[in-house]
Amino acid sequence: MSKALWWIASLFIFLCVSPSPFGVFAIDDFNQAFPIIEPDPGHTKLRISREGLEAISRITNPIAAVAVIGPYRSGKSFLLNQLLSLSCYEGFGVGHMRDTKTKGIWVWGTPVEMDINGVKTSVFYLDTEGFESIGKSNVYDDRIFALATVLSSVLIYNLPETIREADISRLSFAVELAEEFYGRVKGQDVAFEPAKLLWLIQRDFLQGKSVKEMVDEALRHVPNSDGDKNIDQVNQIRDSLAIMGDNSTAFSLPQPHLQRTKLCDLKDGELDQSYVKKREQLKEVVKSVIRPKIVQGKSLNGKEFVSFLEKILEALNKGEIPSTGSLVEVFNKKILERCLKLYEDSMSKVRLPISEQSLQSIHEASRLEAFKVFEEQHFGRHHAKKSVEALNEDIEKMFKNFVMANQYQSSTLCEALYTTCEDKMDQLQVLRLPSMAKFNAGFLHCNQSFEKECVGPSKTIYEQRMVKMMGKSKSLFIKEYNHRLFNWLVAFSLVMVIVGRFIIKFILIEIGAWILFIFLETYTRMFWSPESLYYNPIWHCIVATWETLVYSPILDLDRWAIQIGLLALILLLYWRCYGRRKHGSYSLLPLYNNGGSKVRHRSE
């Protein structure tokens, strides 16, 4: 029995502590407030609270957010409860002590469903930690303000009684954000729309001025004859806020009741009726300006809103102070990746190697196209410069890789062509039958193929090597050509003497062979040196005849010499063995006679 109780208790504990997909207890009732952002232990930076994000991520409709910001103990939580028609005991916690009640950013778990321009939209209300509370840094307040500014569709700036200089200074981030993101060309799919700013002055005791007049007066330039930098900075914010006038509105609420500590216990009938009337008007004003949160041209559902929040928080926590520059970097990160991919794809279509000029031209065109897309889609006006520099740096790095690849491919191709030509020249040096015509044809073919196929940055270097190698090969061939041809003709004349005398017994062939032999070996030695022979017109005639016989576009005798020699030998043997038996010894040619008288006469 005790063992069974132990198992039941263990199962109960497991179910209690088992985390939901968001790492917190599973939420059964969303009709309550949840934290979505909380301070870190040092109270300088922000971190995610998954409990509240579960309430948001379950929504599939487009989402809009209404955030209330302002000094601590200014009635922000009470205002939100009023907008949601909730009591203090049902809605956001309301504190009456000196320290702030809300820590970080909280969300009401059940959104208000609205039809906005025919689109069913889920509206979340966000409560933020107040400014200037005890034990916090100004940087922490800036991060809260910045995050609320970015997340919300409507930003209610809740101020007690009047607008102070410090209240305007705090809008510097909102102004910079609007200058960076707002005012991009409408209709593009990259527009990021900052929140609609609603100035709300609570407990307005000032008579004779409307809240609009109060805001306009607060935004007027302050004289700065002394050149105070702080006043100049606030005046710049005033100028920007005046320009953003179409993106802001103003409203005032009178004091609901004199006894503020009892507000949570009072019914509407016990509150000041002028307050109740103005409160209902405020609800309508807020509803009229609510729009779904648009990022990169599309509205966000719950999961997308949570992902958006995480990106923004990462950017705002970067560095010592939150900045629109870091925010711009986050938004432009994917755009940079797309533009870089566009450049890479364009360059990857090029078949390497190509000339350096062609590669440079393609690089410039691809780079221009990538920057054109970035210019159309990027976020930010002033801080986008850093993203542009990053894109340019990444493109240059990638281009260097393409340049190196082109150099390698060019070197590999030209080296292969050079080696082929070198082998070809070596083969031409050792022709069985030396032929200047064949060498020149091979020389020309190598030059033409190299010039046509070798491209890229390595071409110049290999052209120089080719000129040296080809010149050396040609000089060596010419030097050996006349000597080899001379020896070959001497041997050929002796062979033809033997063939004409003993094999085919054709006297004219023998005589011609003897004349050639005598000319080469005797006459040239008596009258010219072997070197001077090569400049003699007779030698030129012999060379021209040789070149005509050995090489032509139709017949390459060097290639077919063995085959032709074997065929001639077979025909000769056939004629010697069978031809004379069949046709007799009669011939029109002056052949040798095998008769005895002829033999005796020669012996005599």
Image (cartoon, rainbow, N blue to C red):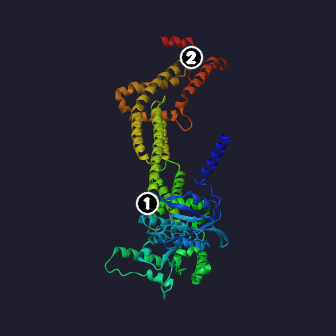
Question: At label 2, which amino acid type do we have?
Answer: Asn
Tell which residue pokes out farthest to the front in this image.
Answer: 1
Rendered-image quadrant of the N terminus: top right
Q: Secondary structure at mark 1?
A: helix
State which quadrant residue 84 falls in: bottom right
The earlier-in-sequence mark between 1 and 2 is 1
Q: In the image, is 47 to the left or to the right of 571?
A: left
| Number of on-image labels | 2
Question: At label 1, which amino acid type do we have?
Answer: Glu
Q: Which mark is residue 593?
A: 2
State which quadrant residue 192 falls in: bottom right
Residue 2 in picture, x, y percent from top left: 66, 41
Front-lying residue, 229 or 442? 229
Q: Which residue is mark 1?
A: 389
Closer to viewer: mark 1 or mark 2? 1
Residue 399 in picture, x, y percent from top left: 46, 52
**Looking at the image, is 496 positioned above or below residue 72?**
above
